[in-house]
Amino acid sequence: MDSRGTWDSNPLNASDAGVAAVSNILQSFPRNQSTFDAVKASSAAFIKDIELWSTPPGIVQYISAREVAHDYEQIRIALGYEKVNFLALSYGTYRANQYAAYYPQRVGNFVFDAVIPHGIAYKKVLESAPIPALNCVAEGGSPGCATTVTALNIQLAVSNDLESQGVDFPTLFQSLNTSLHGDASAFGGSGAVPSNLNIFTIGTILLECGDNNYQDTTFAEWEKSLNAGLTVLAPSPTRSPMVASDAQQHDPNQIAQPPTWQLQLGCLAWPFPTPPYAPLITEVPMLLVTSDFDGGAPTEWAEASRAQAHNSVLVVRHGDSHTSFSLSDQPSTIIMKEFLVTGRMPTAMNNSQVTVYTPGMIRAPIPDPYSVLTGEVAGDVNSGNLTNAAILP
């Protein structure tokens, strides 16, 4: 099914002015009250624009996980199924979990890949998954690309790359290196509104606003959240809390672009009621899947979901990238397919590619990303574009 507000299911719509308002939100993060207020005003303009331009007008208020979960049930009834099996990816896990809470008797074989838990105030756990600041756009773009490709173009492209499956680091580094030497065509786009901003790329902000209570966020709360997230970018071994000046020092170009911070800013002016943060406790057996270094749904979130689903089995793929199911040659995918088809939970196992934790087992510490295997042997993409890829100044 197409979830509410997407594709053929009453898709959200926006005018050019609404898209432009989002570009204001996604610029460098606010560091004082006045810029925070300006971002909140852009959020209000963006949401109002979507509300007016979508069909039927006002549908934006009714696209949260609560409504979508009931839509799932209507489909089950229409198809005449006693129970449903469900493969949920990324934010789909949040919605599928909501369905399981509403209709536990209808849950068949549920697989949650890249889990997003309920009951977690995302702005308080941002420190677990920042997108590293990249010095390649230290001055807002290299000479020659600043006039044709904005810093925001590069920020969004790099952020999307780092969250995608099988990041092609050689090509990414080559693109950054080429940009630094006067040609940023690899990142495309021009003008005040980046070409990769449109209703399809920004609509996900609104699809999540109704599930997260961000509209009461003050500048002090935002600054605390931002500084906590940027702490992990600091070289200090103690990782002590930073003040605003320290955060500025460790992200001097203000180009860190985690999607959760973007979501928080986009939803600042959400005018509709949102539910309080509350865990969804379930005894229904579920298969939870994560990777050690998922930049879109940090592996800590899988642990939070596991604590709420007492009979769940956790599959940890040793690697990076967001979601695992499409990696057909990985043991984690084989495990998921087996459970979806047969309903048989995997037994405990541990090897270089995957670890399976059954109920009651304690998860081993997350490995140090700088000490794990890399390269082709570890499943990293090798595009062959290695020439000059390591000469970033």
Image (cartoon, grey):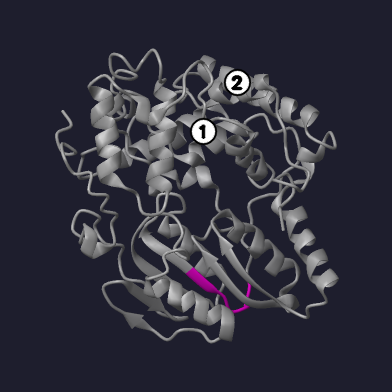
Kindly tell me whether residue 4 is visible in this rendering: yes
Secondary structure beneath label 1: helix
Q: Is residue 252 left or right of residue 206?
A: left
In the rendered image, residue 49 lying in the magenta stretch gets the answer: no
Where in the figure is residue 190, as x and y percent of width and height?
47, 19
Residue numbers of the magenta segment: 282-288
Where in the figure is residue 393, as x and y percent of width and height?
15, 28
Q: Is residue 103 left or right of residue 268?
A: right
**Which image quadrant: the N terminus?**
bottom right
Residue furthest front in the image: 384
Please give the name of the residue rendered at 23% of the width and 44% of the height, measured from the top-left corner: 385
- Name the quadrant containing residue 97: bottom right
Q: Main secondary structure of the magenta part?
A: loop
Kindly tell me whether residue 255 is visible in this rendering: no
Label disc, if present, on residue 20 of the rendered structure: 2
Location of mark 1 (residue):
221
Please give the name of the residue rendered at 41% of the width and 65% of the height, measured from the top-left corner: 327
Residue type indicated by callout 1: Glu
